[in-house]
Amino acid sequence: MTKVLYFIIVVSFLDTFIQLPIITPYALDLGASHFMAGAIVAVYSLTNMVGNIFGGHLIDLFGRKKLLLIGMLSAAVILFFYPFAQTPEHLFLIRLLHGLAGGVLIPAAFAYVGDKTRKGSRGKSMALTGACIGIAAIIGPAVGGIMAARAQIDYVFWLVAVLFLISSLLIVYFVEESFTSKERNKVAMGDFIPLLKHPLLIQASLAAFGLMVSNGTLAFALPLKVQEMGLDSATTGMLLTTFGVIAIIIFLSPTNAIYEKISPIYLVITGLTIIGLVHLSLNFTAIPWVSFLLMMIYGVGFALVFPSMNQIVSEVSTMVDRGKAYGIFYAFFSLGSVAGSSLSGATTEVFGLPFTSSATIMLGISVILFVMSGRRRV
């Protein structure tokens, strides 16, 4: 995998992370209710899920490079429209289109990674892609939060749009197709059926759902928690950056040997349990330093989950169906974001405890995965 693709993965995830501290306040400033703000956060992931499913087949049919380029260019154009939203409904529509356009980006990138790495080294390869995401998690929330605090939200969207345009040029000139036309002749829509029945892909997809429930909840609820403590958007950015710093240390340090030595499903179960307990604790903290400590622990959980579940997907798929496998996987990713932000918004309205639903879901999924993994050994 080339350095260019690493950069593309950073930019793709930067698009999400840089908006975490600002979308909820931006929606509220436009007059949205808490429920509508949650819907605005969620609709991106909802349409992203549609893009994942249909894009997964197209990634196999037409190749990784073409779909990467189409997704990048489409998202770049849509990002330019964010500053012109005048009502919550306008912002909702823009987010809807943004999610649809970007739905093929991550499955195409990770299908490319799977194509280029051999079984036995995929754990560390996925850790390196996790490091790319960690970099995005460090830079994105900090930049988004600081620019929002300085009333420069418009520039956040324009900055990412320019980065997407630069990435499009890099794809054209430096990314080579990893899936040959001869192999693509074997691609069929029917490949979805055995993938949907594969126990390991089901477990990885449930893990993706759980992880993104946590991220979707953070996108909606963490800015509100920070406001309750009397702090600004820059603090939200620093909190989110904290978990990225911890995760990237684990991804790039000698500790990344755990991805080759320990079964990925057990790393996933442990990580989701840690994150679930962090969310439960976030409901009740009102002290900034405790919040920072919890986000450090969250970073450990994220580092355990992300490379491990991607490793599972790569190992259960082949070049012929890898786009579909990652399409299914990232559809659950997107569904988790929808559930996280939507349920968090509803829980805030009813109980005033926005992290309760996410904690319950993640701990529940941990139990389900433990039971499923036990049955596979019997």
Image: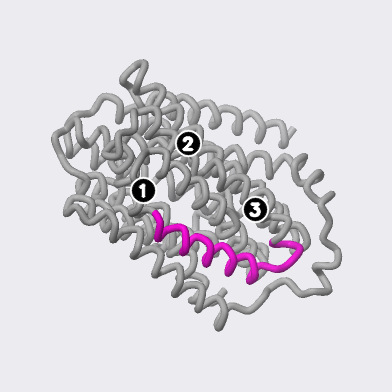
Give me the C-alpha separation between circle 3 and circle 1: 32 Å
Considering only vertical position in the picture, is 44 above or below 103?
above
Q: Nearer the viewer, residue 343 or 318?
A: 343
User: Crowding at label 2, few (<14), some or many (≥20) Cα neighbours within 10 Å?
Assistant: many
Q: Quickly name the residue at label 2.
A: 213
Whichever of callouts 1 and 2 sits on the residue coming sooner in the sequence is 1
Instruction: Tell me the SS state at disc 3.
Output: helix
User: Crowding at label 3, few (<14), some or many (≥20) Cα neighbours within 10 Å?
Assistant: many
Q: State whether the magenta stretch is mostly helix, strand or loop.
A: helix
The residue under label 1 is which amino acid type? Ala
User: Crowding at label 1, few (<14), some or many (≥20) Cα neighbours within 10 Å?
Assistant: some
* Quadrant occupied by the N terminus: bottom right
| Residue farthest toward the bottom in the current orientation of the protein | 173
Q: Quickly name the residue at label 1.
A: 85
Q: Is residue 270 visible?
A: no
Residue 153 x/y as whole percent? 27, 54
Give me the C-alpha separation between circle 2 and circle 3: 18 Å
Whichever of callouts 3 and 1 sits on the residue coming sooner in the sequence is 1
Q: Which mark is residue 326?
A: 3
Residue 296 part of the magenta-drawn span: no
Tally the marks. 3
Residue 220 x/y as whole percent? 36, 36
The residue under label 3 is which amino acid type? Tyr
Whichever of callouts 2 and 3 sits on the residue coming sooner in the sequence is 2
| Range drawn in magenta | 59-81
What residue do we see at 66% from left, 47% from top? 328
In the image, is 185 to the left or to the right of 134?
Answer: right
